[in-house]
Image: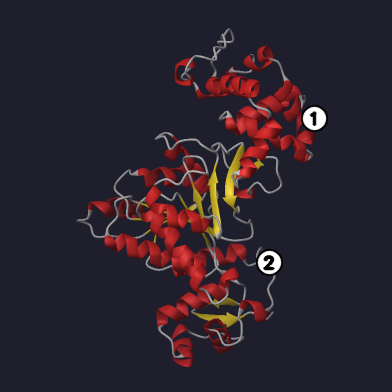
Amino acid sequence: MTGEEYKTYCETAFIPEFEKYYMQFSRAGMSSSQVIKLEEAFGGAENAYLASDEELLGLIPVRTGVADRNIKLDDNKPADEEDNERGTLAMRRFIKIRKQTDPEDDLKRVAHLGINYVSMRHPDYPGRLSRITGRPAGLFYKGNLPEAHTPAVAIVGSRDCSNYGKEIAIKLAKGLAGAGVDIISGMAMGIDGFAHRGALNAASEHQRPGNAGQTYAILGCGADICYPRSNLDIYSRMAVSGGIISEHYPGTEPVSYNFPHRNRIISGLSDAILVVEARERSGSWITVDFGLEQGKDIYAVPGRITDRLSNGCNNLIKLGAKLVTGEEDIIKDLAPKYLNRRRPQTLAAACPAGTEQKKVYDALDMTPVSINEITVSCQMTVSRVMQILAELELKGCAARLGTGYVRVIH
């Protein structure tokens, strides 16, 4: 297939019947680059799936640079002894899988588990991931996938966080989700889990739950496995209000390699990354590194200089991460990016009568009104007024002008 032919193929590549083939590529652990090479070599997913063993083995060097094409397939040989190179291993695993599995039956089996699958060619595949290097070839998920029009923030941090870190993670996640921002994390113990809990609390307490941000967990195992088990309650809630997402085939156990590697998806699905408590060069830094490569904004919560759990955050701030003391610090940066991308809302939908949002909106004018003036007019605390203003900005109902805020007419 020529370059021009492949470009045309990609523009018309989604064929629902071919999802079963892509799922087998994902099941084998193929990278998106390896799947693309298969598409280029054989003229599409179906032809690639039906190619001979010899033709497939001839493509092994695509990812790894390994020139060993004279590999004897041995169904009794453990996968971890076959080859150290992941590309080679994935190709060999794929050849074995297709001998043992009917792709149509496998697709039905996964659906029976309550798990959906989208390939990188599916229109529902997250657009944010399409723009990153090393995107997954496909995603398995329970619940929903994040929507492109909704802002999203990844919240990550230490597994053995302090009580202070727990409170801050819940508070910031709840505040962001309450303003309509999706929360992305890895459902690990500590900060990850508390961030999910904060977002879920916002959805349950929101005056209009449908307007609250959702929360999505990116797992380093199959989407059918709750790891750690201590987070079973939020796992169950996210499958209904948000989503459980994995690039791994159902039943994949939580092995150590998968966790740092999945961090590229956490950062890829987010507009920004917020670090709450992290040791120097901890796992959170892996997510930050991926985020920087992807051009994401980095935020960090400062901590005591004598606290090892705060060393990572304090050093991130030294290196240029934005200091965060409240969710409004992030929302004010997100709002301009989404004012023209959010689904249009009527004023009644964005600021229902009798709500605090409507009260603050009514206190605004076409000329700038200061936060102090709004606080006095609405009889609210400064922090609450700032949070509501951030929500109104995100909904396109208010805008900052100079040192005050103005009303945006709908």
Residue under label 1: 5
**Is residue 302 at least partly visible in the picture?**
no
Report helix, strand or loop for mark 2: loop
**Vertical relation: 388 (above or below) 141:** below
**Vertical relation: 28 (above or below) 281:** above
Q: Residue at x 33, y 54 (%)?
A: 313
Query: Where does the image place residue 174, in percent across and percent down from the top left?
Result: 45, 67
**Is residue 199 at least partly visible in the picture?**
yes
Query: Could you say which is closer to the camera, residue 218 or residue 229?
Result: 229
Give the left or right position of residue 321, taking residue 160 as reference: right
Query: Where does the image place residue 108, in percent across and percent down from the top left?
Result: 67, 39
**Vertical relation: 17 (above or below) 226:** above
Residue under label 2: 343
Query: Could you say which is closer to the camera, residue 125 or residue 93?
Result: 93
Q: Amino acid at mark 1?
A: Glu
Query: Where does the image place residue 395, in percent across and percent down from the top left?
Result: 60, 72
- Looking at the rendered structure, which numbered label has been put on residue 342? none
Q: Residue at x 58, y 88 (%)?
A: 362
Task: Write down the quadrant of residue 72 in the picture.
Answer: top right
Q: Residue at x 55, y 84 (%)?
A: 355
| Of pointers 1 and 2, the one earlier in the residue sequence | 1
Q: Residue at x 41, y 53 (%)?
A: 231
Query: Looking at the image, do the residues carrying marks 1 and 2 touch, with CB atoms under 8 Å apart?
Result: no
From the image, which quarter does the N terminus lie in? top right
Report helix, strand or loop for mark 1: helix
Query: Where does the image place residue 118, in percent across and percent down from the top left?
Result: 65, 43
Task: Write down the quadrant of residue 131 in the picture.
Answer: top right
